[in-house]
Amino acid sequence: MILVDGLPAASVDARDRGLAYGDGVFRTLRCQAGEPRWWHDQISTLASDCAALALPAPEAACLQDEVRRVADGADCAVKIIVTRGSGARGYAPTGMSATRIVLASPLPPHARPDAPVDVHARLCTLRLAAQPRLAGVKHLNRLENVLARGEWDDPACFEGLLCDASGHLVGGTFSNLFWLAGHTLFTPPLDTCGIAGVTRARLLRRARRLGLAVQVERHPPAAILAADEVLIGNSLIGLRRLARLDDTPLPDAGWRRPLDELVHEDLD
């Protein structure tokens, strides 16, 4: 089911700026039995992303109702899109009313409960461009991710890791990246590029409950090859362990399960 501004529809105006310019934001979340998971985190992050683009954020109660309508009691993935709306040609963002799109899809195979928790990844050749104004924002212009994902067609490769122009790790094409060394959890900063996911935020604010220090630092790919354990995560898959990067096997220090449980606990 698809709702556009609260009404069933399968299309938007061809002049919509989300289509023309990528002028908008989105969030993908998981519903369980029709209820959106981590709703407070999701709606807060959506509002923050809207503010970064000077977009009006949807009213939370209205949006939650629409998410429940499209989910229709199912375990599924729901995508929320907010664009600046339709208007005359040209870049000037004036005189428009935002468009709100909510759509549900079946959970992809890699997000189902029986999906493997140990996965393989590759290091992509594409480098992410720096744009501090948009850093961390899940905006609609995801062409870099599309091009990076086009670098492989091996079904055994689950994810591709991306670096910035200086060769420092940023994250995956659809996930955030973490690694552990001793009792320290590392993740790249997202101040010049990359997406700040809800799973990342939940993990970073909770990791100290397990006695972990948290370091948000720039590192080259060599850092994860020397790590005790490497994890990726997003709102659909939770946390998965990278068992291999290209041809290099990666160790398992036993952190994935307790950290994944911590992310999913209803603590705050």
Image: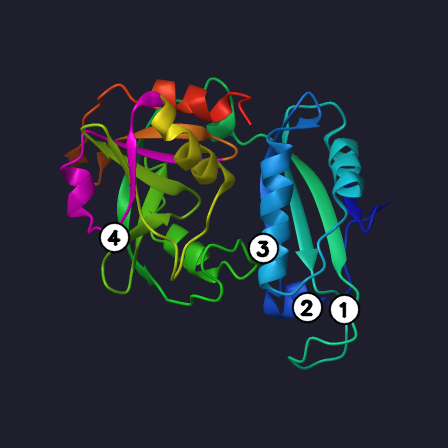
Kindly identify the residue that appears in the image at 58 percent across and 46 percent down. 45
Give the residue type at disc 2: Arg
Badge 1 is on which residue?
Answer: 86
State the extent of the magenta-drawn residues as a range.
210-234
Q: Position of residue 191 (x, y in %)?
A: 39, 58
Residue contact between numbered discs 4 and 1, judged by CB atoms under 8 Å: no
SS of the residue under disc 2: helix
* Most foreground residue, 38 or 17: 38
SS of the residue under disc 4: loop
Badge 2 is on which residue?
Answer: 17
Q: Earlier in the sequence, mark 4 or mark 1?
A: 1
Residue 212 is a magenta residue: yes
Q: Position of residue 32 (x, y in %)?
A: 64, 23
Q: Nearer the viewer, mark 1 or mark 3?
A: 3
Residue contact between numbered discs 1 and 2, judged by CB atoms under 8 Å: yes
Residue at far right of view: 7
Mark 1 burial class by Cα count in 10 Å: few <14, some 14-19, many 20+: many
Give the residue type at disc 3: Asp
SS of the residue under disc 1: loop
Q: Quadrant of the N terminus?
A: top right
Q: Earlier in the sequence, mark 3 or mark 4?
A: 3
SS of the residue under disc 3: helix
Q: Position of residue 261 (x, y in %)?
A: 44, 19
